[in-house]
Image (cartoon, rainbow, N blue to C red):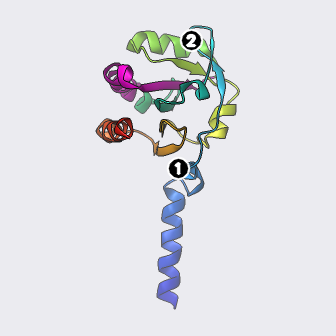
Amino acid sequence: MKGLGKILLVAALTVLAQGGIAASDLTGQSAPDFALKSATGENLRLSEYRGDVVMINFWATWCGPCRQEMPLLDDLYSRYQRVGFSLLGVNIDDDSRRAMQMVEELGVNFPVLFDEKKTVSKLYQVEAMPVTVIVDRAGTVRHVHHGYKPGYEEQYLTQIRALLRE
């Protein structure tokens, strides 16, 4: 019984080390709706994108992997926007001016929203950067990705294509 107890303890600690179960609890649930001010000054609401496959990417200017990932996400956005794919970049910085500088520097074209009060990132249980949530056409969270490493964009591409075919 001691051996089994150790195995269960190691398994539980592994789950916690990977961000716990709660962080991905959104998978299979309706994506929490929100409205945030965008870089263009208008408020954008997630529910307005119902019918599209939507990627929500939470990012910050101080996040190196975010900076690395954003141009790759912009490529996905450019390629699939015309066939029902939307991408919302949700910046969590306290100062939206720094975020706008980074967006201009990287030349990304997808809509950027500002979550300065962190209300939306709390709704989505964001605890580290970046977090990428993929929502299907019906508004259900289908995939949640924590962090970014080169090659993740291939997973995104596979998941987006599958959801666009549904």
Residue in view at x 45 percent, y 18 percent? 110
Q: Nearer the viewer, residue 100 or 113?
A: 113
Residue in view at x 53 percent, y 74 percent? 9
Q: Main secondary structure of the magenta part?
A: helix
Q: Position of residue 18 (x, y in %)?
A: 48, 55
Magenta region: 67-93
Given this view, does label 2 or label 1 mark the residue nearer the observer? 1
Residue 116: quarter of image? top right
Question: According to the image, label 1 marks what residue?
Answer: 27
Q: Is residue 118 left or right of residue 144?
A: right
Q: Nearer the viewer, residue 75 or 86?
A: 86
Marker disc for residue 19? none
How many tags in the picture?
A: 2
The answer to whether residue 90 is magenta is yes
Question: According to the image, label 2 marks what residue?
Answer: 39
Residue in view at x 66 percent, y 39 percent? 123
Which element carries disc 1, helix, strand or loop? loop
The answer to whether residue 92 is seen in the rendering is no
Residue in view at x 64 percent, y 33 percent? 33
Which element carries disc 2, helix, strand or loop? loop
